[in-house]
Image (cartoon, rainbow, N blue to C red):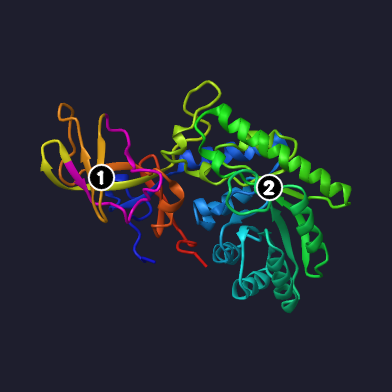
């Protein structure tokens, strides 16, 4: 991790060194408050996903606004959050192998820990690890509701695992994980609604089957930034695991609302400040940030607030931009702001978040869980 942030508290935006990952604090706070208020209105728990920001300072703001805890995707991510005082974490993923399970069990002695399972042998090994630490691990059975990633099929396969968990002395069956990741980026409102309606039906059938066997679900978790409205109003889901809402990104901005317009519930708050380091043509500039500063899995970034600017391509440390030469074109050393296409992996490329308000640096937060892959 770099010990040198790109700015100092009190500096003007113009003086932030580049490339830098910058957060508009007003927009961030709008997003945090909007989601927290919505969850309260719908009487569902909010457990935001920390993989979007990997930043304990933001996690604490979410907790202060009413979140019950956070989601993490890896044990190492959960360890960072717990070590920074977040004492209720869900590893919304499978944890396999005795080394990682021992770490998970040790963490359960410091905080409330939940984890997802979809395999009987994993359940048995997890119980052995928890027993060796005299710990209790809370467990959700992950249900494949359409994403085709992890999880068992609804109903009987879930029942079999839930019954196995309940036989384990050091595990506590806590409910279901039913996140539909693929649905988050279905562009049409109706398409997303139908996908979650189908998922909700499968989850409801599963809950009913468990109830027939006197097994209750404290947690029915899911919901992402693209679909949270549908889960929150379903009457079935009771815990939202939204993540990207804190920052948004260009890809989420392509989703449409029920009027066919781009969704505007949340504001873009995450940007990459760059500088022009070369101007080889009158209408083309090269920026000092490239693939090591942003993710391209959802496409190239876009230029923010400059009309008719086109990102031509990216290399490790460079981004090529074509400008409309009939309009003012940035000069050598000028700042150009990029909007990333996918916030989560972009954040993981940086050490610091530089928070600005009214063009002034007001916060510098370490991205403490950067690179937490184990």
Packing grade of label 2 (10 A; few <14, some 14-19, many >=20) is many
In this view, 145 is above or below 160: above
Q: Who's the residue at 68% across and 53% down the image?
A: 152
Residue 1 placement (x, y as % from top left): 39, 66
In this view, 349 is above or below 192: below
**Left or right of 276: which side holds 48?**
right
Residue 188 placement (x, y as % from top left): 52, 28
Residue 144 placement (x, y as % from top left): 65, 48
Residue 17 placement (x, y as % from top left): 28, 53
In this view, 59 is above or below 80: above
Identify the disc placed on residue 221: 2
Q: Residue furthest bottom?
A: 132
- Magenta: main secondary structure: loop
Identify the disc placed on residue 313: 1
Identify the disc placed on residue 274: none
Q: Secondary structure at mark 2?
A: strand
286 inside magenta stretch: yes
Q: Which residues make up the magenta segment? A: 285-307
């Amino acid at each position: 991790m770099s010990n040198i942030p790109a700015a100092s508290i009190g500096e003007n935006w113009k003086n932030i060194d580049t490339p830098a990952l910058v957060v508009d604090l007003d927009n961030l706070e709008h997003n945090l408050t909007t989601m927290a208020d919505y969850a309260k209105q719908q009487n569902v728990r909010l457990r935001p996903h920390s993989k979007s920001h990997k930043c304990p300072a933001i996690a604490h703001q979410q907790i202060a606004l009413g979140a019950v805890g956070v989601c993490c995707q890896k044990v190492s991510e959960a360890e960072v959050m717990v070590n920074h005082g977040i004492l209720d974490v869900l590893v919304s993923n499978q944890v396999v192998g005795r080394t990682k399970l021992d770490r998970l069990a040790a963490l359960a002695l410091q905080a409330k820990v939940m984890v997802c399972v979809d395999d009987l042998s994993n359940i048995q090994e997890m119980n052995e690890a928890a027993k060796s630490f005299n710990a209790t691990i809370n467990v959700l059975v992950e249900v494949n509701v359409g994403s085709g990633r992890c999880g068992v099929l609804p109903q009987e396969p879930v029942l079999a695992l839930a019954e196995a968990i309940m036989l384990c002395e050091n595990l506590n069956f806590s409910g279901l994980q039913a996140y539909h990741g693929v649905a988050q980026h279905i562009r049409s409102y109706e398409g997303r609604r139908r996908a979650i309606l189908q998922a909700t039906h499968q989850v409801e059938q599963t809950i009913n089957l468990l109830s027939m066997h006197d097994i209750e679900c404290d947690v029915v978790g899911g919901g992402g930034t693209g679909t949270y409205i549908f889960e929150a109003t379903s009457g079935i889901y009771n815990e939202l695991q939204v993540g990207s809402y804190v920052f948004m990104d260009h890809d989420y901005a392509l989703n449409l609302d029920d009027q066919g317009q781009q969704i505007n519930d949340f504001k873009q708050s995450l940007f990459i400040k760059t500088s022009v380091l070369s101007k080889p043509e009158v209408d083309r500039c090269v920026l000092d940030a490239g693939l090591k500063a942003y993710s391209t899995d959802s496409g190239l970034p876009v230029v923010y607030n400059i009309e008719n600017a086109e990102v031509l391509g990216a290399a490790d440390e460079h981004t090529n931009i074509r400008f409309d030469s009939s309009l003012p074109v940035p000069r050598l050393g000028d700042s150009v702001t990029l909007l990333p296409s996918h916030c989560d992996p972009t954040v993981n490329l940086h050490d610091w978040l530089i928070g600005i308000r009214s063009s002034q640096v007001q916060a510098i937060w370490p991205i403490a869980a950067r690179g937490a892959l184990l």
